Amino acid sequence: MALPVRQQVKYWGIAAVVFLLVLWLLGGVIVPFLVGGAVAYFMDPVADRLEKMGFSRAAATAIISVIALVIFVLGALLVVPTLVRQLAQLINTAPQIFNQFQTFLTEHFPSLMDEQSVLRETLSSFGEMIRQRGGQLVSTALSSALGVVNFIVFLVVVPVVAFYMLLDWDRMMRHLDSYLPREHAPTIRAIAKDIDQTLAGFVRGQVLVCMILGVYYAVTLTLVGLNFGFVVGAIAGFLTFIPYVGALVGGGLAIGLALFQFWGDWWWIVAVWAIFQSGQFVEGNILTPKLVGGSVGLHPVWLLFALSAFGTLFGFAGMLVAVPVAAALGVIARFFIGQYKDSKLYQGIADADYEPDYRVEVRMTDDLRPAGTTVLDHKGRVVTTPPAASPQDGSADPA
Protein backbone atom coordinates (compact mmCIF):
# COMPACT_ATOMS: atom_id res chain seq x y z
CA MET A 1 0.00 0.00 0.00
CA ALA A 2 1.47 3.35 -1.01
CA LEU A 3 2.25 5.96 1.61
CA PRO A 4 0.00 9.02 1.69
CA VAL A 5 1.31 12.04 -0.16
CA ARG A 6 1.67 14.02 3.07
CA GLN A 7 4.01 11.41 4.58
CA GLN A 8 6.05 11.17 1.40
CA VAL A 9 6.52 14.96 1.36
CA LYS A 10 7.54 14.83 5.02
CA TYR A 11 10.21 12.16 4.42
CA TRP A 12 11.65 13.90 1.33
CA GLY A 13 11.66 17.20 3.23
CA ILE A 14 13.58 15.62 6.10
CA ALA A 15 16.14 14.26 3.62
CA ALA A 16 16.60 17.74 2.11
CA VAL A 17 17.05 19.32 5.56
CA VAL A 18 19.64 16.70 6.52
CA PHE A 19 21.55 17.35 3.29
CA LEU A 20 21.63 21.11 3.89
CA LEU A 21 22.59 20.63 7.55
CA VAL A 22 25.50 18.35 6.65
CA LEU A 23 26.61 20.82 3.99
CA TRP A 24 26.52 23.65 6.53
CA LEU A 25 28.28 21.80 9.35
CA LEU A 26 30.92 19.97 7.30
CA GLY A 27 31.29 22.38 4.38
CA GLY A 28 35.04 22.83 4.70
CA VAL A 29 35.77 19.18 5.43
CA ILE A 30 33.82 17.73 2.52
CA VAL A 31 35.24 20.11 -0.12
CA PRO A 32 37.93 17.62 -1.30
CA PHE A 33 35.33 14.87 -1.55
CA LEU A 34 32.94 17.10 -3.50
CA VAL A 35 35.73 18.07 -5.89
CA GLY A 36 36.81 14.45 -6.27
CA GLY A 37 33.23 13.35 -6.90
CA ALA A 38 32.78 16.09 -9.49
CA VAL A 39 35.96 15.01 -11.29
CA ALA A 40 34.77 11.39 -11.30
CA TYR A 41 31.35 12.40 -12.63
CA PHE A 42 32.81 14.43 -15.49
CA MET A 43 35.36 11.77 -16.40
CA ASP A 44 32.92 8.84 -16.32
CA PRO A 45 31.88 9.24 -20.01
CA VAL A 46 35.56 9.18 -21.00
CA ALA A 47 36.08 5.99 -18.99
CA ASP A 48 32.98 4.42 -20.58
CA ARG A 49 34.31 5.24 -24.03
CA LEU A 50 37.67 3.68 -23.21
CA GLU A 51 35.86 0.56 -21.99
CA LYS A 52 34.06 0.33 -25.32
CA MET A 53 37.49 0.45 -26.99
CA GLY A 54 38.48 -2.71 -25.11
CA PHE A 55 40.12 -1.40 -21.94
CA SER A 56 39.10 -2.63 -18.52
CA ARG A 57 37.61 -0.18 -16.05
CA ALA A 58 40.80 -0.19 -13.99
CA ALA A 59 42.96 0.45 -17.08
CA ALA A 60 40.67 3.25 -18.26
CA THR A 61 40.80 4.88 -14.81
CA ALA A 62 44.60 4.59 -14.73
CA ILE A 63 44.96 6.19 -18.19
CA ILE A 64 42.71 9.10 -17.24
CA SER A 65 44.57 9.60 -13.94
CA VAL A 66 47.99 9.69 -15.61
CA ILE A 67 46.88 12.21 -18.25
CA ALA A 68 45.23 14.38 -15.58
CA LEU A 69 48.38 14.26 -13.47
CA VAL A 70 50.56 15.37 -16.39
CA ILE A 71 48.20 18.26 -17.20
CA PHE A 72 48.13 19.32 -13.54
CA VAL A 73 51.92 19.29 -13.20
CA LEU A 74 52.39 21.29 -16.40
CA GLY A 75 49.79 23.80 -15.28
CA ALA A 76 51.34 24.13 -11.84
CA LEU A 77 54.81 24.69 -13.30
CA LEU A 78 53.99 26.89 -16.30
CA VAL A 79 50.62 28.59 -15.90
CA VAL A 80 49.98 29.16 -12.20
CA PRO A 81 53.22 31.10 -11.43
CA THR A 82 52.55 33.50 -14.33
CA LEU A 83 48.97 34.05 -13.21
CA VAL A 84 49.98 34.72 -9.60
CA ARG A 85 52.78 37.08 -10.61
CA GLN A 86 50.63 39.13 -13.00
CA LEU A 87 47.73 39.24 -10.54
CA ALA A 88 50.01 40.60 -7.82
CA GLN A 89 51.44 43.18 -10.21
CA LEU A 90 47.96 44.25 -11.31
CA ILE A 91 46.88 44.75 -7.69
CA ASN A 92 50.01 46.76 -6.84
CA THR A 93 49.68 48.88 -10.00
CA ALA A 94 46.01 49.72 -9.41
CA PRO A 95 46.68 53.00 -7.51
CA GLN A 96 48.99 54.24 -10.30
CA ILE A 97 46.41 53.38 -12.96
CA PHE A 98 43.67 55.27 -11.16
CA ASN A 99 45.97 58.24 -10.51
CA GLN A 100 46.83 58.48 -14.20
CA PHE A 101 43.17 58.11 -15.12
CA GLN A 102 42.41 60.95 -12.73
CA THR A 103 45.12 63.08 -14.35
CA PHE A 104 43.68 62.35 -17.80
CA LEU A 105 40.20 63.41 -16.70
CA THR A 106 41.60 66.56 -15.08
CA GLU A 107 43.37 67.58 -18.30
CA HIS A 108 40.50 66.86 -20.67
CA PHE A 109 37.42 67.34 -18.46
CA PRO A 110 38.38 69.83 -15.75
CA SER A 111 34.77 70.56 -14.85
CA LEU A 112 34.31 66.97 -13.69
CA MET A 113 37.45 66.93 -11.54
CA ASP A 114 37.29 70.04 -9.37
CA GLU A 115 38.36 69.82 -5.74
CA GLN A 116 34.80 69.24 -4.54
CA SER A 117 34.05 66.56 -7.15
CA VAL A 118 32.72 63.26 -5.88
CA LEU A 119 34.33 61.55 -8.88
CA ARG A 120 37.76 62.87 -7.88
CA GLU A 121 37.42 61.58 -4.32
CA THR A 122 36.12 58.22 -5.53
CA LEU A 123 39.00 57.67 -7.94
CA SER A 124 41.54 58.73 -5.32
CA SER A 125 40.34 56.15 -2.84
CA PHE A 126 39.37 53.34 -5.19
CA GLY A 127 42.84 52.43 -6.42
CA GLU A 128 44.30 52.47 -2.91
CA MET A 129 41.46 50.29 -1.69
CA ILE A 130 42.21 47.73 -4.41
CA ARG A 131 45.89 47.70 -3.48
CA GLN A 132 45.19 47.28 0.22
CA ARG A 133 42.40 44.75 -0.04
CA GLY A 134 43.32 42.98 -3.27
CA GLY A 135 45.80 40.68 -1.61
CA GLN A 136 43.34 40.10 1.21
CA LEU A 137 40.63 39.17 -1.28
CA VAL A 138 42.91 36.70 -3.05
CA SER A 139 44.04 35.09 0.17
CA THR A 140 40.44 34.92 1.40
CA ALA A 141 39.35 33.23 -1.81
CA LEU A 142 42.15 30.69 -1.53
CA SER A 143 41.49 30.00 2.13
CA SER A 144 37.76 29.59 1.55
CA ALA A 145 38.44 27.28 -1.37
CA LEU A 146 40.61 25.08 0.80
CA GLY A 147 38.40 25.28 3.90
CA VAL A 148 39.86 23.74 7.02
CA VAL A 149 42.04 21.26 5.20
CA ASN A 150 45.65 21.91 4.44
CA PHE A 151 46.65 22.62 0.83
CA ILE A 152 48.85 19.55 0.69
CA VAL A 153 46.07 17.36 2.09
CA PHE A 154 43.70 18.83 -0.48
CA LEU A 155 46.05 17.93 -3.32
CA VAL A 156 46.38 14.39 -1.99
CA VAL A 157 42.75 13.69 -1.11
CA VAL A 158 41.15 14.94 -4.33
CA PRO A 159 43.06 12.63 -6.72
CA VAL A 160 42.56 9.63 -4.43
CA VAL A 161 38.82 10.25 -4.07
CA ALA A 162 38.45 10.90 -7.80
CA PHE A 163 40.36 7.71 -8.69
CA TYR A 164 38.32 5.37 -6.49
CA MET A 165 34.97 7.00 -7.31
CA LEU A 166 35.73 6.81 -11.04
CA LEU A 167 36.78 3.18 -10.66
CA ASP A 168 33.55 2.22 -8.84
CA TRP A 169 31.18 4.73 -10.47
CA ASP A 170 28.96 2.25 -12.32
CA ARG A 171 28.75 -0.03 -9.28
CA MET A 172 27.78 2.92 -7.05
CA MET A 173 25.04 3.93 -9.48
CA ARG A 174 23.61 0.39 -9.42
CA HIS A 175 23.58 0.40 -5.62
CA LEU A 176 21.87 3.77 -5.50
CA ASP A 177 19.27 2.56 -7.99
CA SER A 178 18.52 -0.46 -5.78
CA TYR A 179 17.75 1.87 -2.85
CA LEU A 180 15.11 3.88 -4.71
CA PRO A 181 11.51 3.48 -3.50
CA ARG A 182 10.00 0.95 -5.86
CA GLU A 183 6.77 2.88 -6.42
CA HIS A 184 8.57 6.01 -7.61
CA ALA A 185 11.71 4.43 -9.11
CA PRO A 186 10.74 4.98 -12.80
CA THR A 187 9.87 8.63 -12.16
CA ILE A 188 13.06 9.23 -10.16
CA ARG A 189 15.15 7.60 -12.90
CA ALA A 190 13.54 9.82 -15.54
CA ILE A 191 14.15 12.95 -13.46
CA ALA A 192 17.75 11.88 -12.72
CA LYS A 193 18.37 11.28 -16.43
CA ASP A 194 17.06 14.75 -17.24
CA ILE A 195 19.29 16.27 -14.53
CA ASP A 196 22.29 14.37 -15.90
CA GLN A 197 21.58 15.64 -19.42
CA THR A 198 21.29 19.19 -18.11
CA LEU A 199 24.59 18.97 -16.23
CA ALA A 200 26.30 17.24 -19.12
CA GLY A 201 25.06 19.86 -21.55
CA PHE A 202 25.91 22.84 -19.40
CA VAL A 203 28.81 22.05 -17.08
CA ARG A 204 30.89 19.81 -19.33
CA GLY A 205 30.24 21.98 -22.37
CA GLN A 206 30.69 25.26 -20.52
CA VAL A 207 33.97 24.12 -18.98
CA LEU A 208 35.33 23.41 -22.45
CA VAL A 209 34.11 26.81 -23.66
CA CYS A 210 35.80 28.50 -20.69
CA MET A 211 39.10 26.72 -21.34
CA ILE A 212 39.10 27.50 -25.06
CA LEU A 213 38.20 31.17 -24.59
CA GLY A 214 40.59 31.56 -21.66
CA VAL A 215 43.50 30.25 -23.70
CA TYR A 216 42.49 32.37 -26.70
CA TYR A 217 42.15 35.60 -24.71
CA ALA A 218 45.33 35.03 -22.71
CA VAL A 219 47.48 34.21 -25.74
CA THR A 220 46.14 36.95 -28.04
CA LEU A 221 46.22 39.69 -25.40
CA THR A 222 49.79 38.73 -24.56
CA LEU A 223 50.75 38.78 -28.26
CA VAL A 224 49.42 42.34 -28.74
CA GLY A 225 51.56 43.41 -25.79
CA LEU A 226 48.81 44.28 -23.29
CA ASN A 227 50.13 44.50 -19.76
CA PHE A 228 48.60 41.81 -17.53
CA GLY A 229 47.04 40.33 -20.66
CA PHE A 230 47.60 36.76 -19.49
CA VAL A 231 45.74 37.17 -16.19
CA VAL A 232 43.00 39.27 -17.84
CA GLY A 233 42.44 36.51 -20.41
CA ALA A 234 42.33 33.88 -17.67
CA ILE A 235 39.79 35.92 -15.69
CA ALA A 236 37.64 36.43 -18.79
CA GLY A 237 37.74 32.72 -19.62
CA PHE A 238 36.93 31.67 -16.04
CA LEU A 239 33.98 34.06 -15.75
CA THR A 240 32.60 32.82 -19.09
CA PHE A 241 31.13 29.98 -17.02
CA ILE A 242 28.43 32.51 -16.11
CA PRO A 243 26.95 33.66 -19.46
CA TYR A 244 27.69 37.28 -20.42
CA VAL A 245 29.66 37.97 -17.21
CA GLY A 246 33.01 36.90 -18.67
CA ALA A 247 32.62 39.13 -21.72
CA LEU A 248 31.54 42.15 -19.67
CA VAL A 249 34.16 41.88 -16.93
CA GLY A 250 37.06 40.64 -19.06
CA GLY A 251 36.30 42.93 -21.98
CA GLY A 252 35.84 45.97 -19.77
CA LEU A 253 39.07 45.26 -17.89
CA ALA A 254 41.08 44.61 -21.06
CA ILE A 255 39.82 47.69 -22.91
CA GLY A 256 40.36 49.83 -19.81
CA LEU A 257 43.96 48.65 -19.53
CA ALA A 258 44.42 49.17 -23.28
CA LEU A 259 43.20 52.77 -22.99
CA PHE A 260 45.61 53.32 -20.12
CA GLN A 261 48.58 51.72 -21.93
CA PHE A 262 47.97 52.58 -25.61
CA TRP A 263 46.32 56.01 -25.35
CA GLY A 264 46.86 57.78 -28.65
CA ASP A 265 47.86 54.57 -30.45
CA TRP A 266 44.35 53.65 -31.48
CA TRP A 267 45.22 50.62 -33.60
CA TRP A 268 46.24 48.61 -30.53
CA ILE A 269 43.10 49.62 -28.66
CA VAL A 270 41.02 48.50 -31.63
CA ALA A 271 43.01 45.25 -31.69
CA VAL A 272 42.10 44.53 -28.05
CA TRP A 273 38.46 45.30 -28.80
CA ALA A 274 38.58 43.04 -31.88
CA ILE A 275 39.97 40.17 -29.80
CA PHE A 276 36.98 40.19 -27.48
CA GLN A 277 34.54 40.85 -30.29
CA SER A 278 35.83 37.85 -32.25
CA GLY A 279 35.85 35.74 -29.09
CA GLN A 280 32.19 36.54 -28.44
CA PHE A 281 31.29 35.80 -32.05
CA VAL A 282 33.00 32.40 -31.94
CA GLU A 283 31.45 31.60 -28.57
CA GLY A 284 27.90 32.55 -29.58
CA ASN A 285 27.91 30.99 -33.06
CA ILE A 286 30.26 28.02 -32.83
CA LEU A 287 31.38 26.97 -29.34
CA THR A 288 28.18 27.29 -27.31
CA PRO A 289 25.85 25.72 -29.94
CA LYS A 290 28.25 22.83 -30.53
CA LEU A 291 29.46 22.14 -26.97
CA VAL A 292 26.66 23.36 -24.72
CA GLY A 293 23.56 23.17 -26.89
CA GLY A 294 20.67 25.48 -27.54
CA SER A 295 18.79 25.08 -24.26
CA VAL A 296 19.91 23.26 -21.12
CA GLY A 297 17.41 24.69 -18.67
CA LEU A 298 19.84 26.85 -16.67
CA HIS A 299 18.99 30.51 -17.10
CA PRO A 300 21.90 32.88 -16.34
CA VAL A 301 19.88 34.73 -13.68
CA TRP A 302 18.93 31.46 -11.98
CA LEU A 303 22.57 30.33 -12.08
CA LEU A 304 23.79 33.62 -10.58
CA PHE A 305 21.22 33.39 -7.80
CA ALA A 306 22.15 29.80 -6.98
CA LEU A 307 25.88 30.60 -6.84
CA SER A 308 25.29 33.68 -4.69
CA ALA A 309 22.84 32.02 -2.31
CA PHE A 310 24.75 28.77 -1.78
CA GLY A 311 28.10 30.59 -1.63
CA THR A 312 26.80 32.93 1.07
CA LEU A 313 25.17 30.17 3.13
CA PHE A 314 27.67 27.33 2.77
CA GLY A 315 30.91 28.90 1.53
CA PHE A 316 32.99 27.32 -1.22
CA ALA A 317 31.33 23.93 -0.68
CA GLY A 318 27.99 25.58 -1.40
CA MET A 319 29.33 27.06 -4.63
CA LEU A 320 30.44 23.59 -5.72
CA VAL A 321 26.97 22.11 -5.26
CA ALA A 322 25.14 25.23 -6.48
CA VAL A 323 25.14 24.25 -10.16
CA PRO A 324 23.97 20.63 -9.63
CA VAL A 325 21.32 21.76 -7.17
CA ALA A 326 20.18 24.53 -9.53
CA ALA A 327 19.95 22.02 -12.38
CA ALA A 328 18.05 19.54 -10.20
CA LEU A 329 15.60 22.18 -8.97
CA GLY A 330 15.03 23.37 -12.53
CA VAL A 331 14.29 19.84 -13.75
CA ILE A 332 12.01 19.10 -10.77
CA ALA A 333 10.17 22.39 -11.32
CA ARG A 334 9.62 21.52 -15.00
CA PHE A 335 8.36 18.06 -13.94
CA PHE A 336 5.78 19.50 -11.57
CA ILE A 337 4.74 22.10 -14.14
CA GLY A 338 4.18 19.25 -16.62
CA GLN A 339 2.12 17.37 -14.02
CA TYR A 340 0.09 20.53 -13.38
CA LYS A 341 -0.59 21.06 -17.09
CA ASP A 342 -1.80 17.45 -17.41
CA SER A 343 -4.17 17.85 -14.46
CA LYS A 344 -7.83 18.89 -14.46
CA LEU A 345 -6.84 21.90 -12.36
CA TYR A 346 -5.16 23.35 -15.49
CA GLN A 347 -7.22 21.79 -18.29
CA GLY A 348 -10.63 21.90 -16.67
CA ILE A 349 -13.37 19.43 -17.67
CA ALA A 350 -13.17 18.12 -21.21
CA ASP A 351 -16.09 19.11 -23.46
CA ALA A 352 -16.64 15.51 -24.52
CA ASP A 353 -17.30 14.47 -20.92
CA TYR A 354 -19.55 17.41 -20.14
CA GLU A 355 -23.29 16.70 -19.85
CA PRO A 356 -25.65 19.48 -18.76
CA ASP A 357 -27.85 18.82 -15.77
CA TYR A 358 -30.83 20.60 -17.28
CA ARG A 359 -33.45 19.69 -19.89
CA VAL A 360 -35.33 21.97 -22.21
CA GLU A 361 -38.90 21.01 -22.81
CA VAL A 362 -41.08 22.68 -25.46
CA ARG A 363 -44.70 22.51 -24.39
CA MET A 364 -46.70 23.00 -27.55
CA THR A 365 -49.63 21.23 -28.97
CA ASP A 366 -49.10 19.54 -32.28
CA ASP A 367 -51.37 21.94 -34.09
CA LEU A 368 -49.48 25.01 -32.77
CA ARG A 369 -45.91 23.69 -33.29
CA PRO A 370 -44.40 25.04 -36.50
CA ALA A 371 -42.79 22.65 -38.87
CA GLY A 372 -39.01 22.28 -38.34
CA THR A 373 -38.93 23.69 -34.77
CA THR A 374 -35.49 23.23 -33.13
CA VAL A 375 -35.26 22.16 -29.49
CA LEU A 376 -32.59 20.76 -27.13
CA ASP A 377 -32.66 17.16 -26.04
CA HIS A 378 -31.78 15.95 -22.54
CA LYS A 379 -28.05 16.10 -23.38
CA GLY A 380 -28.18 19.67 -24.60
CA ARG A 381 -27.97 18.75 -28.28
CA VAL A 382 -29.93 20.67 -30.94
CA VAL A 383 -32.57 18.60 -32.74
CA THR A 384 -35.26 19.53 -35.27
CA THR A 385 -38.80 18.38 -34.63
CA PRO A 386 -40.92 16.97 -37.45
CA PRO A 387 -43.94 18.93 -38.67
CA ALA A 388 -47.30 18.32 -37.08
CA ALA A 389 -49.57 15.65 -38.61
CA SER A 390 -52.07 16.88 -41.24
CA PRO A 391 -55.18 15.38 -42.90
CA GLN A 392 -53.28 15.08 -46.15
CA ASP A 393 -51.01 12.53 -44.43
CA GLY A 394 -54.05 10.29 -43.98
CA SER A 395 -54.58 10.99 -40.29
CA ALA A 396 -58.08 11.59 -38.97
CA ASP A 397 -59.19 14.59 -36.97
CA PRO A 398 -59.69 13.47 -33.34
CA ALA A 399 -62.75 15.65 -33.16
Image (tube, rainbow, N blue to C red):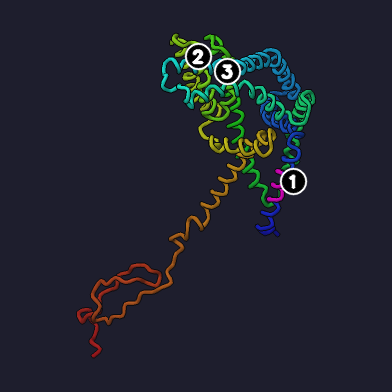
The mark nearer the N terminus, 1 or 3, is 3
At 64% from the left and 17% from the top, the residue drawn is 88
Q: Which residue position holds label 3?
A: 95
Return the residue found at the far left: 392
Q: Is the stretch drawn in magenta largely helix, strand or loop?
A: helix
Percent across and percent down for residue 337 are 54, 49
Q: Is residue 279 magenta?
A: no
Looking at the rendered structure, the secondary structure element under dot 1 is loop
Percent across and percent down for residue 202 are 58, 32
Residue neighbourhood size for the residue with mark 1, other residues' Cα within 10 Å, grouped as few (<14), some (14–19), many (≥20): few
Q: Which mark is residue 179?
A: 1
Q: Is residue 206 left or right of residue 358?
A: right
Return the residue found at the far bottom: 399
- Relative to 79, residue 6 above or below: below
Percent across and percent down for residue 315 are 68, 35
Q: Which residue position holds label 2?
A: 260
At 68% from the left and 14% from the top, the residue drawn is 81
Cα–Cα span, label 1 and label 2? 61 Å
The residue type indicated by label 3 comes to: Pro
Q: Is residue 92 left or right of residue 182?
A: left
Cα–Cα span, label 3 and label 2? 13 Å
Relative depth, front residue between 147 and 56: 147
In this rendering, does residue 216 appear at all? no
Q: Is residue 30 left or right of residue 312?
A: right
Placement of the N terminus among the 4 image quadrants: bottom right
Q: Is residue 17 magenta?
A: yes
